[in-house]
Image: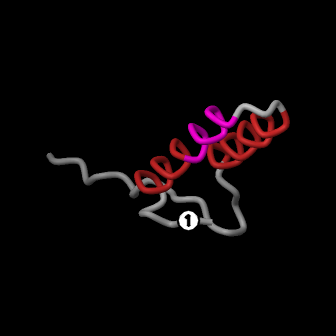
Amino acid sequence: MVTPPGPPPRRPTDAEPCRTCEEFDLDEAVARAEHDASRETDCRVLRRRHQQADHGGQQS
């Protein structure tokens, strides 16, 4: 007997913020406060990659 596949992975909605996105935002803010432009850029790039992979390209 073949087991049907489970439900598709849930994607965060506007009502349910994405913890990973929030962590990238926080890390970017800390880097900005520490005047670390390189780390700030890294956070933006990593967040964009995460959004494309996990949110279907949504940008907020």
> Which type of secondary structure does the marked residue at label 1 adopt?
loop
Figure quadrant of residue 23: top right
| Mark 1 lies on residue | 59
* Up-down relation of residue 41 to residue 35 (above or below): below
- In the rendered image, residue 10, in percent from the top left (x then y), is placed at 50, 57
- What is the crowding at mark 1: few (fewer than 14 residues within 10 Å), some, or many (at least 20)? few
Residue shown at the point (66%, 42%) measured from the top left: 24
- In the rendered image, residue 60, in percent from the top left (x then y), is placed at 63, 66
Between 3 and 47, the one lying in front of the other is: 47
Residue shown at the point (68%, 37%) measured from the top left: 37
- In the rendered image, residue 15, in percent from the top left (x then y), is placed at 72, 67
Residue shown at the point (61%, 33%) measured from the top left: 38
- Majority secondary structure in the magenta region: helix
Q: Which residues are magenta?
A: 37-44
* Up-down relation of residue 54 to residue 42 (above or below): below
Mark 1: amino acid: Gln
15 falls in the magenta region: no
Q: Residue furthest left?
A: 1
Residue shown at the point (76%, 41%) measured from the top left: 26
